[in-house]
Structures are given as C-alpha cells and as structure tokens.
C-alpha cells in the first residue's frame, strides 16, 4: 500500500524496538521518514534498509530531552522533505528502578526530561511546523500501561508515563480545532530491547507469571503490531479519533 506517498513522518527513538518498526511501517505505506535517536550507526543502518526497498529516509542524531536538539530535528524534517504530516513521540528510557526513599534526584530528572519534557518539546515544534505548513497533521505520543498502573520502585517511569495522559489531552483540545489530531498509545509487554531489560530487572519468574496469568493473549506483542496501530492512528482511517488513549496490551490491564 502506498497511500502515504506524499506524506512525511518523524519518529523519535527510531533506532530500535517500537520506533524502528514504526519507521518501517510508515515507509512501507510510502511515507518519507525522518528517523531520530541518539545512535547514528543504528539509524544509518535502518535508513539504508528503507532506501534499499525504494523508500525515503533521513537520519537525525538528537537528544529529545534538549530543546535545541528537538528544534533542529523538526527543522531537518522540513528542510529535507518540505513538510511534516505525522509525528510519533516514542523515545523514552525506563530509568533505574528504586524505592522513592532511595531514588536520586538526578535520576528522577533524567527520566522526567527524557520521557515527559521531551514530548512537550516535540509537540511544540511539531505542531508549529504543521501549522506553518499544510495545517493538517497527526501526532501519536507513546505512553505505556504504566500510564495507568504503578508498581513499587517505578515512581519516575510511571509518573512520566501518567503525565502523558494530561499532556495528550491538552494538546488534543488545543490542536484538534486547528487540524491536528493528538493521541496516546499505551502498549503493554512488547518484545523490544527495553522489554528485555525490564524482564531482567523483575526476574523471569514474575515476568512469566504476568504473561501467562494477566495477558489474555498469553504472549508479548511484536513491535510490528504496535507500529501498525500507530500508523492507523495517523492515517485517514482514524480521522475522528483525537485525545484518545489506545491500549494494545493483549488484555493485560483488563483483569486482575
Ligand atoms: N517494550 C515495551 O514493553 C513497552 C511497553 C510500554 C511502553 N513502551 C514504550 O514504547 C516506547 C518505545 O520503547 P521500546 O520498547 O521500543 O524501547 P527501546 O529501548 O528499544 O527504544 C527506545 C528508543 O528511544 C531512544 N532514546 C532514549 N532516550 C533518548 C533520548 N534522550 N533522545 C533520543 N532518543 C532516545 C533509544 O535510543 C531507542 O531508540 C517507549 O516510549 C516506551 O516507554 C514500551
């Protein structure tokens, strides 16, 4: 399908996992993709793969927690491809897990800057670019089931992901009347490098128990499955969806 032929999509955190799969999914629909993250080598490898399949891709090395970097990233999209139609604010870190009594202030700040402030910075630049251009667009912020659920030692990550509900709601209210839809996607277990780090942290026994007892589909999601949902939210098929929270979690949050 090449229905996104004339469109341009920016994906942050595109070097691995969900971001990488999302870039590939947009490219498969014909969109030019601007892939942003911190690791140049991984991004260039992905851009090469997309181009070898006839797609259009451009790389930006960026730290989404830094305002000037985000400004440069969105400017790069406009300079390279002339417009911005879709943006996926996906980059995040899980941070160090620690009890509130032990969590260093710098670690709280690092997680909040990377996961929450970054999305504000991205939304601001992306919306400005969309409003200055076609006056249409769709933005997907990536939350988590931890946008609703907490767990001991997860205060920084969980709070940053909860914050995205408020940020997405306000952005949708402000931008929908101006032609830009903003939604929040909250995945459950997805088979990515972050997920494997999480598994190592909580231990195989608890991980397998959660998967076999709580996830109705009894398996982790694949990055490609999440990517398809993100592309759907950006597409015209989702033209009446804004300010929504979609939870591709295999049923994880539905039952105790
Ligand atoms: N994998 C899961 O099970 C899961 C579950 C719920 C939510 N999520 C969310 O999905 C999104 C993608 O996660 P993933 O599992 O693909 O993780 P991942 O660790 O595989 O990928 C995260 C990406 O973000 C990039 N990144 C991190 N900090 C950055 C920064 N400061 N500037 C630029 N890029 C930065 C990393 O380099 C990487 O490319 C995240 O928002 C995560 O919180 C993942």
Image (cartoon, grey):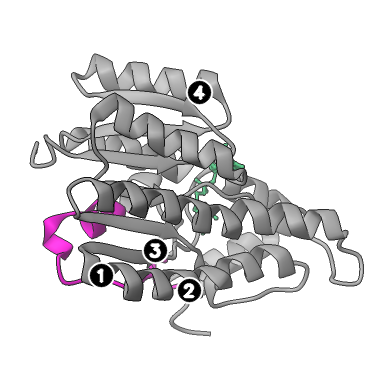
Residue 61's spot in the image, x, y percent?
52, 27
The magenta segment is 226-252
Asked if residue 204 shows in the view, the reply is no
Quadrant for the N terminus, please.
Answer: top left
Instruction: Give the CA distance from mark 3 to mark 2.
Output: 10 Å
Kind of element beneath mark 4: helix
Residue 84's spot in the image, x, y percent?
27, 42
Which residue is disc 2 drawn over?
A: 165
Kind of element beneath mark 3: strand
Which residue is disc 3 drawn over?
A: 185
Instruction: Give the CA distance from mark 1 to mark 3.
Output: 17 Å
Q: Judge depth for marks 2 and 1 and give the one in front.
A: 1
Q: Nearer the viewer, residue 187 or 214?
A: 187
Q: Quadrant of residue 105?
A: bottom right
Determine whether the beta carbon of the residue marked 1 sits less than 8 angstroms from the nearest atom of ligand 1.
no
Could you tell me how many numbered marks the image carries?
4
Which residue is disc 1 drawn over?
A: 176
Q: Is residue 85 magenta?
A: no
Residues at badges 3 and 2 in contact (C-beta under 8 Å)?
Answer: no
């Amino acid at each position: 399908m090449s229905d996104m032929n004339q469109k341009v999509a920016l994906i942050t955190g595109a070097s691995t996992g969900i971001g990488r799969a999302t870039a590939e999914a947009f490219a498969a629909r014909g969109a030019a993709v601007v892939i942003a993250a911190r690791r140049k080598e991984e991004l260039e490898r992905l851009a090469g793969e997309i181009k070898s399949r006839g797609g259009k891709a451009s790389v930006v090395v960026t730290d989404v927690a830094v305002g000037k970097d985000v400004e440069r990233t969105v400017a790069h999209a406009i300079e390279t491809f002339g417009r911005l139609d879709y943006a996926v604010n996906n980059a995040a870190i899980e941070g160090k897990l620690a009890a509130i009594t032990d969590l260093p202030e710098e670690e709280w700040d690092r997680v909040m800057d990377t996961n929450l402030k970054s999305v504000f910075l991205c939304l601001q630049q992306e919306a400005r670019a969309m409003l200055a251009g076609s006056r249409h667009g769709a933005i997907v912020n990536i939350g988590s089931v931890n946008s609703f659920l907490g767990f001991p030692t997860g205060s920084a990550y969980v709070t940053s992901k909860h914050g995205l509900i408020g940020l997405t709601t306000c952005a949708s209210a402000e931008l929908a009347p101006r032609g830009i839809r903003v939604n929040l996607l909250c995945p459950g277990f997805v088979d990515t490098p972050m997920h494997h780090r999480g598994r190592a942290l909580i231990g195989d026994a608890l991980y397998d128990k959660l998967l076999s007892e709580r996830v109705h589909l009894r398996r982790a999601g694949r990055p490609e499955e999440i990517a398809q949902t993100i592309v759907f939210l950006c597409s015209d098929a989702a033209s009446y969806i804004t300010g929504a929270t979609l939870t591709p979690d295999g049923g994880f949050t539905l039952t105790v």
